Image (cartoon, rainbow, N blue to C red):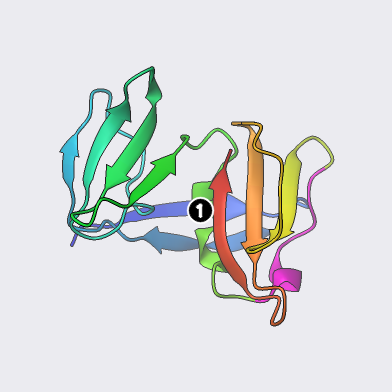
Amino acid sequence: MISTTVGYASAQNDPIPSEVLGEPDVIIDADPEPPFIYWAPEGSTIRNHPHDPMIWIAESADGSRKYYFGDQCRASQFQGFVGEPLDSLPKKPADVTWRMACSTCAVTSDLGRERMNVFFDENSRIISSISCG
C-alpha cells in the first residue's frame, strides 16, 4: 500500500500533525486521475463522471458507487479527524464554508465544491466522514 502525507494548520495557523492518507487497492480508469484515492473503497474502479471529468466515481463489484468532487475545500487535510469527536476539529476559518450535519440528517443536494462537509454520528458526535461538495 502506498500512502500520501498531507500536513495542515488550524484556523490560527497552529501546526496540526501531518496525516498519512491511505491509498486503497483500486483500479484507476480515469483521465484526469483524482488528486487522492483515500476515499475510494478497496477493490473499486475509479472513473470520471460522464458529464464532468472533475467528478470521480468509485464503483464496487456489488454496484455501489461513491462520488468524489475533488479537494478544493482541502478535505484531504482533515481526514485525521474522521473517527474523532466533532469538537476535536479546529476552529473554522472565517473565509471558508463548512457544513456540519449528522450522517442521517437531511441536507440540501446542492454541490459546493469549496464547501467542506463534516458528517457525524448524531448520538456519539463522532465524525464519520469529511468531504468536499
Q: Position of residue 108 (x, y in %)?
A: 71, 40
Placement of 4 over or under 47, stated as above or below:
below
- Residue 28 shows up from this direction: yes
Q: Quadrant of the N terminus?
A: bottom left
Q: Quadrant of the C terminus?
A: top right
In reply to whether residue 105 is colored magenta, the answer given is no
- Which residues fall within the magenta stretch? 85-93
For the point 84% across and 40% down, the residue is 94
Q: Position of residue 120 (x, y in %)?
A: 65, 67
Number of callouts in the render?
Answer: 1
Placement of 14 over or under 99, stated as above or below:
below
Residue linked to disc 1: 7
Q: Quadrant of residue 58?
A: top left
For the point 32% across and 21% down, the residue is 50
For the point 71% across and 76% down, the residue is 125
Q: Using residue 8 as the reference point, say whether residue 63 is left or right of it.
A: left
Q: Amino acid at mark 1?
A: Gly
From the image, give the main secondary structure of the stretch colored magenta: loop
Q: Name the outermost residue toward the top.
A: 51
For the point 64% across and 49% down, the residue is 117
Q: Using residue 2 as the reference point, say whether residue 85 is left or right of it.
A: right
Q: Label 1 neighbourhood size at 10 Å, few (<14), some (14-19), many (20+)? A: few
Q: Position of residue 6 (x, y in %)?
A: 45, 52
